[in-house]
Amino acid sequence: MSLRACRGSHANFALDARGPDRASCRAGMAGQDETEKIGMHDRRELFRKRAARRTRIIATVGPASSAPERLAALWAAGVDVFRLNMSHGDQADHEEVVTAIRALEDRAGRPIAIMADLQGPKLRIDVFSSGSVELQEGAAFVLDDEKVPGDESRVRLPHPEILQVLRPGMEILLDDGRIRLEVVEATAHRALTRVKVGGTLSNRKGVNVPGAVLPLSPLTAKDYRDLEFALRVGVDWIAQSFVQRPEDVAETRKIVAGRAGVLAKIEKPSAVAEIEGILEIADAVMVARGDLGVELPLEDVPGAQRRIVRAARETGKPVVVATQMLESMIHSPVPTRAEVSDVANAVESGADAIMLSAESAVGEYPVEAVRVMHRIALKVEQDPAYGLAAIRHVAPTETVEDAITASARQVAETVHARAIVTFTTSGSTALRAARERPQVPILVLTPRTSVARRLCLAWGLYPVKTRDVTSFEEMAGKARRMALRHGLATGGERIAITAGFPFGTPGSTNLLHIAYVTGDELKRREA
């Protein structure tokens, strides 16, 4: 089924479907002719339903989801951002996916964000002469730089940067923490360790050193190539792996030069310790619980997640919670109860976005996983016990822009406005509005496609690309029409509008206006 055929499903919208993927693009079977019959009322209903969920959903694209019709079904199910995992596939495959997503975006009439996730350095041991060995608890085991296949007593570690920082008492984790070693003696060429947790160790398994900041660039030669490719095809976010310190993010930002947002993946204890400094440089952060759960004691991961989310909330930067959120849905059409609680807790904590990895990349039920995630997030957000007030109040900075956006939230609640409409050129005003966590949708109007796409990652924002305004009357009229057209307000309701004067000047938000929607603005515009 083509992208155009799948677009027909938007009239009925798949967000509320309960069955597994067999129904993933039901209405899309109607084909192109049915697509052309979608009226303004149906389109408003579609837009309204998409705006109802404030927490955003990221889906990783892989063999189970890269076909154009499957991408369309995932979007219809609620995906806001598609993630390209640069660790897998080649650039030609990724470019085909980007082309398909942009075609879907044109047909859907909504901005869709694309994130390229860089692989980062992969630290691994070398090979064994027998392919694998059995390490016994308490035994001695050596890591060295000798270019000789390993055995039960030693193996080559082809990373001199690791050997240089090892000190007695440090812990080394192999194979995602399944094997644990303690350093007894260390030189620049050799480390003698004692096996704390043994088991089978085979060729080229991963290495983690939780207690060390490694003198490594976060970008490998492959990352530089993938970064150049991602910027060339126009992705909206660059996710950077192996971030240890703020300087790592600064290196990537210099290369990106504003052509995309830079998201720092927090997956190392040193990054958690320096989260405030990283947030000063990064545009967003991700709680990458997979590697973080290897390098931190498992019982420390929830606390680290809360700290990262809280720090991001305080700075107004988007924060993503990722890894194993609905892991069982790789093979099952329904998640475990614990997974449901995990997703709900991430939403409750105030995360901007929640992410599917293998569930949507290689799983048997990728579309259903998105639907489940959508339903959980929406249910939590609609619960009267949802702690919106607790996660909302972040002290604004002493700026006019923060004062206006904080006031917009307060005024909208006082006069029962149906939506907040914000005009933005750079996106900064919209992020300030999201930081306030208002109880109503935030309609973001921007003249820049790149900004509209990038804002798809942030909580509660409903971005729309439109021409800029040049006068107060044009601003108020466009805000009313767009709120009406996208189903965020109806006749007889109020909206709160924020903008900057002079119009079109980035970072100049200084205007708050309450407007009344009559309901006939679109008809008058057509007349």
Image (cartoon, rainbow, N blue to C red):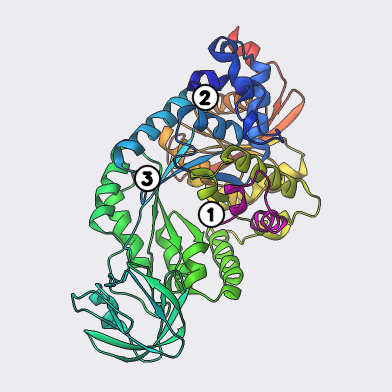
What is the C-alpha distance between the residues marked 2 and 3?
Answer: 21 Å
Up-down relation of residue 227 to residue 422 (above or below): below
Q: Which badge, 1 or 3, is on the more N-terminal residue?
A: 3
Percent position of residue 444, x then y: 55, 36
Q: Is residue 468 visible?
A: no
Instruction: Name the residue located 74 percent from the left edge and 57 percent from the top edge.
Output: 387
| Residue nearest the observer in this picture, 175 or 4 | 175
Query: Is 143 on the left-hand or right-hand side of 414?
Result: left
Left or right: where does residue 272 sit relative to residue 521?
Answer: left
Please report whichever mark, 1 or 2, sits nearer to the chain's N-terminal start: 2
Q: Which residues are magenta?
A: 324-348
**Crowd tier of the residue under label 3, counting other residues whose Cα lies within 10 Å: few below 14, some 14–19, many 20 or above:** many
The three-letter amino acid code for the residue at tag 3 is Ala
List the residue tagged with mark 2: 109
Position of residue 276 measured from the top left corner of the image (x, y, whole percent):
47, 68
Q: Vertically, is 508 above or below 121?
A: above
Q: Looking at the picture, which amino acid does disc 2 mark?
A: Gly
**What amino acid does circle 1 point to?**
Val
| Residue 201 is inside the magenta segment | no
What residue is rendered at 21% in x and 79% in y?
145
- Residue 317, position as x, y percentages in the image: 51, 55
Judging by the rendered image, the residue that carries numbered circle 1 is 320
Assess whether mark 2 and mark 1 are in contact (beta carbons under 8 angstroms): no
Q: Please give the residue where the numbered disc 3 appears in the rendered image.
A: 260
